[in-house]
Image (spheres, rainbow, N blue to C red):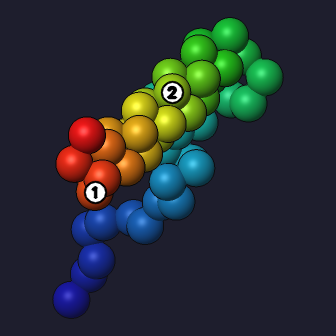
Amino acid sequence: MENKFKTVSIDGLIDRHIGQLGTAKRALYEQRLRIDLILHSIKNRRNTKRL
């Protein structure tokens, strides 16, 4: 049986669809991702403290 699918790393997908490290588009993506992670962390902290 032949495998029709190719395994690709998440880094490879990000490089292909968003851009290589060092490009403006990739920098914007990384910045937005960090902001989203920080906001998610704050939301979880507030929920656990019931604020």
Mark drawn on residue 37: none
- Quarter of the picture containing the C terminus is top left
Instruction: Tell me which amino acid carries mark 2.
Output: Ile
Q: Secondary structure at mark 2?
A: helix
The residue under label 2 is: 35
For image coordinates 59% across by 15% down, the residue present is: 28
Q: Residue furthest right?
A: 22
Instruction: Tell me which amino acid carries mark 1.
Output: Thr
**Mark 2 vs mark 1: which is more N-terminal?**
2
Q: Position of residue 24 (x, y in %)?
A: 68, 10
For image coordinates 43% across by 67% down, the residue present is: 7
Do the residues bearing badges 2 and 1 touch, measured as CB atoms within 8 Å? no
28 over 51 or under it: above or below: above
State the image quarter where residue 23 is shown: top right
Q: How many marks?
A: 2
In the image, taking residue 9 as reference, residue 20 lies left or right, namely right
Q: Secondary structure at mark 1?
A: helix
For image coordinates 52% across by 60% down, the residue present is: 9
The residue under label 1 is: 48
Q: Position of residue 44 (x, y in %)?
A: 32, 49
Depth order, front residue of 15/5: 15
Which is closer to the viewer, label 2 or label 1?
Answer: 1
28 over 7 or under it: above or below: above
30 over 49 or under it: above or below: above
Q: Position of residue 50 (x, y in %)?
A: 22, 48
Report whether residue 16 is seen. no
- Quarter of the picture containing the N terminus is bottom left
In the image, taking residue 50 as reference, residue 42 lies left or right, namely right
Report whether residue 30 is seen. yes
